[in-house]
């Protein structure tokens, strides 16, 4: 550091502070911003003065740090915890600082025999890397390749050092006969982005751990399997466990063979045997990026060498094209729909996202990489470049995908810098998205959204054309013809190859369709349309994994349809629609029945706007109002409301099945629809009720949504949990109509009419089931409750569980003034002072009672299982009731938003917050699919392959076995968190008592 003639501190040109450059949207603050000054307030005076002087001399660096303080609580905390670390970083070359830090950490771990010291050293390295890489990335010093390389290098060094430490421990315990990792017979492979040296900012590390008992220098009587499994569990602890200094990385071992039933470490022989017998195409793709990083590196390379014939086929692997089609459809059921909602969009898994670019490259590598070793690079951008050089893709496609990849990875990294969360989804709130846009360097939400959608659309366009000229699988092998007079022998053989257990019965069913047995298939011209789609439909049903059941569902579908002409014409011209129909019939027969009765609903799926933004509440309300305005009478009005609900339920449901609508958005969509219907029908009921009974002086009514509706977490099968509150001028208790009613009687009758409008079956079916049991005093209380009585009850009589239920209360219908009064009353209850220990004890007791009544041993009972939704909901409700008195920002009806708010305000640490949020999303995603697909409890062994694959896709896992492993581990961690947050204190309190 040198001083200029003016006395200003000048940093060397290669130092980070001199190289930082602000993004166009970052203003240059005058002086040191308050948020930055606050973060530096705890620094030693010499450090603070030096930092202030440095930043005063470097406007660009000051602007970058101001943006960090405004938009990233995580990075701001890293600065606040150790300002001296920030000073050292700013004064040095960032790449050199990272290299020296890694070397120093490895040396410190080698010199230590204490686990706590090792964990601390590794975590300090990770914190240093996080801050350095973030500042260099935001400030334009590191490009994407350098960012990912530095993140990967730190993960490699930490894992290798941890393994070396565990080996020394094994030697000290006399379980290993030699020290050092060479010839150890235990190897750690990095997979995915880690293996490709493309780690993202807050990435999990995907590992596969292998051992060879013949090589391992184990002491006498030490068995290889338990020793190396235990060693792997210790490795996960060293890297993943959160301490006061944070963590290194979350470790994911689920890419190993059959993770739901295999141990954490697998023998080389067992792994090779698995891949030889049943390795899937997605596992071949995964091994493109595999790389040994720790332990016995030579063993890892030898394993990958032996696996080469599995990954890379010698001939051009067009046999994999049908698998590629299946993988592609599992990611998205449709192509060509360009409308993309920006809020909440997942830049990794969503349409036009990072996964599509990776898939675009990897699938073509699989097909041609066996013959051309140049295509075997693990890095996505290098693969695109080689694909262009070798003529597999055009240079224009490479350029556009390369640029989009850089942009989307930058968005991904910036999202993760906010709170060090492994997230890929943009904020769902428009204001929050505007703030994120500024963190990205854009002036406003609109300019960022335009830049994003431009890239997403380009990626989607290239992705949609991937192998589009490949023949459909049904046209590749065998004949599928169904003559009227008798079965075709070659067709029977084809049906058998496709997996139909009873080809004759299948053939008879299809011949019956073509003969016009179902009434809907008798119209002129229908047979020609049907003949055109039958091969694709029969094949698509077979690919679902339960061909016979799927075909039977299709038969019921056609027999229940009133007319099929328009539908079949649409199917003939839209093969993707045929595949989606097969998915629905194979996995969600209840939805298939609804479509059979209203086939016109499928027309909406052909609208390019279908996969864009869902209609918002005003738009939905306007559509409903326009429809109901045409009603001829009250019965027609109720019919129209029910058909409106059915139509929108089908559209939301199909989005869920097609993978274009995540659970959180689906739950909100179902709730939004219910809100609009409740308000509309309530208004009509009140108007007619007043015509008959008049009004009461000062009369006010509020409909409260509770439970899933209140939390906007509804599924296709949810009922409505409601409470009706009212108030009026008690000095004038009689209504003024032709048939006057008195006080509470008036509102009881009105409530019954509202419930009847929502529940009474008509020719169009039932709208909803309604449950009023959450009202004060439950079944024994009146159906409607006065607001003053409600307030007294909540303050003096309500049980803890009733206050927990109230955390999800949301006013659906009321005048603005009465809404404010009701919301104020609810807020007053939730923000009351409570003894957190007693509250936790009550909640733990309640959880135990629910377990006794409902059971908790079935992990696929996603609500009641140990670590299931009830545990997460109870944690969220505890946080609200225990802390809202001092932190009202935590109050929200959504479980997920409560958890996210609790993390933001420091009531949950980052690791707990992310675990609970990810678990909540996973369980809701799986619940949405299961509620659509089945009515009975889910039994994996009895589920169709189509449903198992659909669940895997919903959980963002490559197959069902991996999903189960992920689900079980997630539930284990959630239950441990529940017990730690709620159970420990009450137990101690009871013991003292």
Image (tube, rainbow, N blue to C red):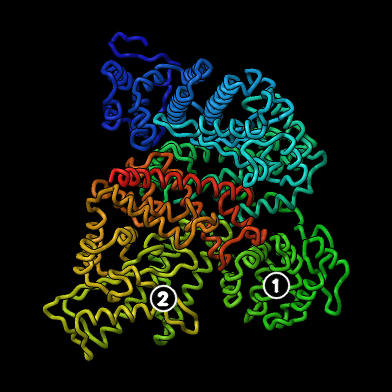
834 shown above or below 4: below
Q: Is residue 140 visible?
A: no
Spatial separation of the CA atoms under disc 2 and disc 1: 39 Å
Residue that badge 1 annotates: 552
Q: Is residue 562 visible?
A: yes
**Residue 668 x, y percent position in the rendering:** 43, 60
At mark 1, the secondary structure is: helix
**Residue 615 x, y percent position in the rendering:** 44, 63
At mark 2, the secondary structure is: helix
Quarter the N terminus occupies: top left
Disc 2 versus disc 1: nearer the observer: 1
Q: Residues within 10 Å of mark 1 (few under 14, many from 20)?
A: some
295 shown above or below 922: above
**Residue 516 x, y percent position in the rendering:** 74, 81
**Residue 336: quadrant of the picture:** bottom right
Which residue is at the far left?
731
**Residue 362: quadrant of the picture:** top right
Name the disc covering residue 521, or none.
none
The mark that comes first in sequence, 2 or 1, is 1
Which residue is at the far bottom?
738
Give the residue drawn at x 35%, y 27%. 79
Residue that badge 2 annotates: 626
Give the residue drawn at x 21%, y 82%. 695
Q: Is residue 580 left or right of residue 720?
A: right
Which residue is at the far right?
489
Q: Residues within 10 Å of mark 2 (few under 14, many from 20)?
A: few
Disc 2 vs disc 1: Cβ atoms closer than 8 Å? no
Give the residue drawn at x 45%, y 22%. 117
Q: Which of 956 and 172 lies nearest the eye of the viewer?
A: 172
């Amino acid at each position: 550091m040198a001083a200029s003639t003016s006395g200003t501190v000048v940093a060397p040109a290669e130092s980070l502070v001199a190289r930082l450059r602000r993004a166009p949207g970052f203003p240059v603050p005058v002086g040191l911003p308050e948020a930055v000054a606050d973060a530096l307030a705890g620094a030693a005076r010499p450090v603070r003065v030096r930092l202030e002087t440095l930043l005063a001399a470097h406007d660009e660096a000051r602007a970058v740090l101001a943006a960090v303080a405004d938009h990233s609580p995580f990075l701001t905390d890293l600065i606040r915890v150790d300002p001296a670390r920030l000073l050292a970083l700013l004064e040095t070359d960032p790449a050199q600082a990272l290299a020296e830090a890694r070397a120093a950490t490895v040396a410190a771990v080698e010199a230590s025999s204490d686990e706590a010291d090792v964990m601390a050293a590794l975590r300090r390295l990770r914190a240093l890397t996080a801050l350095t890489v973030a500042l260099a990335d935001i400030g334009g010093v590191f490009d994407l390749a350098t960012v990912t390389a530095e993140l990967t290098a730190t993960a490699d060094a930490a894992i290798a050092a941890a393994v070396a430490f565990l080996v020394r421990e094994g030697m000290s315990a006399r379980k290993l006969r030699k020290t050092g990792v060479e010839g150890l017979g235990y190897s750690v492979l990095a997979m995915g982005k880690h293996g490709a040296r493309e780690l993202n900012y807050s990435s999990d590390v995907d590992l596969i751990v292998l051992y060879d008992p013949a090589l391992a220098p184990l002491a006498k009587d030490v068995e290889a399997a338990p020793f190396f499994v235990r060693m792997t569990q210790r490795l996960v602890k060293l890297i993943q466990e959160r301490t006061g200094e944070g963590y290194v990385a979350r470790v994911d071992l689920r890419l190993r063979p059959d993770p739901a039933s295999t141990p954490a470490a697998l023998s080389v022989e067992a792994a090779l045997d698995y891949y030889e017998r049943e390795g899937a195409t997605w596992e071949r793709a995964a091994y493109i990026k595999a790389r040994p990083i720790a332990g016995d590196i030579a063993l890892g390379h030898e394993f990958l060498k032996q696996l080469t014939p599995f990954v890379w086929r010698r001939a051009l692997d067009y046999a994999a094209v049908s698998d590629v089609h299946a993988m592609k459809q599992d990611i998205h059921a449709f192509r060509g729909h360009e409308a993309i909602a920006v809020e909440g969009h997942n830049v990794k898994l969503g349409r036009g996202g990072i996964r599509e670019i990776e898939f675009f490259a990897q699938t073509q590598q699989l097909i041609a990489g066996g013959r051309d070793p140049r295509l075997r690079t693990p890095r996505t951008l290098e693969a695109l470049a080689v694909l262009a050089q070798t003529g597999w893709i055009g240079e224009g496609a490479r350029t556009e995908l390369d640029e989009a990849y850089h942009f989307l990875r930058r968005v991904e990294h910036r999202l993760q810098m906010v709170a060090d969360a492994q997230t890929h989804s943009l904020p769902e709130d428009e204001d929050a998205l505007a703030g994120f846009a500024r963190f990205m360097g854009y002036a406003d939400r609109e300019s960022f959204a335009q830049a994003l959608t431009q890239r997403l659309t380009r990626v989607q366009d290239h992705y949609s054309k991937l192998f589009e000229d490949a023949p459909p699988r049904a046209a590749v092998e065998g004949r599928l013809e169904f003559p009227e007079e008798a079965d075709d022998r070659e067709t029977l053989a084809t049906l058998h190859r496709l997996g139909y257990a009873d080809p004759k019965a299948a053939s008879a069913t299809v011949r019956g369709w073509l003969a016009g047995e179902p009434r809907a298939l008798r119209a002129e011209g229908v047979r020609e349309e049907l003949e055109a789609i039958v091969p694709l439909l029969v094949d698509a049903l077979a690919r679902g994994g339960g061909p016979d059941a799927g075909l039977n569902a299709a038969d019921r579908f056609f027999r229940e349809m009133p007319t099929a002409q328009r539908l079949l014409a649409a199917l003939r011209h839209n093969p993707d629609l045929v595949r989606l129909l097969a998915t629905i019939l194979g996995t969600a027969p209840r939805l298939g029945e609804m479509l059979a009765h209203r086939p016109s609903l499928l027309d909406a799926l052909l609208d390019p706007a279908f996969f864009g933004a869902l209609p918002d509440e005003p738009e939905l309300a306007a559509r409903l109002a326009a429809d109901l305005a045409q009603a001829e009478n009250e019965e027609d009005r109720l019919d129209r409301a029910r058909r409106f609900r059915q139509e929108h339920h089908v559209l939301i449901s199909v989005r869920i099945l097609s993978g274009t609508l995540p659970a959180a958005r689906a739950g909100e969509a179902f709730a939004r629809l219910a809100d609009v219907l409740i308000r509309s029908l309530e208004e009509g009921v009140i108007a007619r009720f007043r015509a008959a009974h008049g009004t009461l002086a000062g009369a006010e009514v509020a409909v409260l949504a509770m439970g899933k509706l209140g939390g906007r977490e509804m599924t296709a099968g949810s009922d409505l949990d409601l409470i009706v509150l009212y108030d009026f001028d008690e000095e004038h208790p009689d209504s003024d109509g032709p048939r006057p009613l008195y006080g509470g009687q008036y509102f009881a009758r009105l409530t019954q009419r509202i419930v009847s409008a929502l529940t009474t079956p008509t020719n169009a079916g039932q709208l909803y089931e309604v449950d009023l049991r959450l009202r004060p005093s439950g079944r024994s209380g009146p159906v409607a409750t006065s607001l003053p009585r409600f307030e007294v009850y909540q303050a003096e009589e309500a049980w803890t569980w009733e206050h927990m239920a109230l955390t999800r209360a949301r006013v659906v219908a009321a005048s603005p003034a009465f809404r404010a009064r009701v919301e104020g009353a609810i807020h007053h209850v939730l923000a009351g002072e409570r003894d957190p220990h007693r509250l936790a004890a009550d909640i733990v007791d309640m959880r135990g009672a629910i377990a006794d009544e409902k059971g908790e041993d079935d992990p696929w009972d996603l609500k009641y299982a140990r670590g299931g939704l009830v545990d997460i909901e109870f944690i969220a409700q505890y946080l609200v009731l225990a802390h809202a008195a001092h932190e009202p920002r935590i109050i929200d009806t959504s479980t997920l938003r409560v958890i996210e708010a609790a993390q933001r305000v420091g009531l949950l640490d980052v690791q707990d917050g992310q675990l609970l949020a990810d678990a909540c999303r996973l369980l809701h995603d799986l619940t949405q699919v299961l509620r659509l697909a089945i009515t009975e409890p889910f039994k994996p062994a009895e589920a169709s392959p189509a449903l198992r694959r659909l669940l895997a896709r919903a959980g963002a896992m490559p197959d069902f076995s991996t999903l189960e492993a992920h689900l079980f581990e997630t539930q284990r961690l959630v239950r441990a968190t529940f017990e730690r947050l709620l159970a420990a204190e009450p137990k101690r309190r009871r013991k003292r008592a």
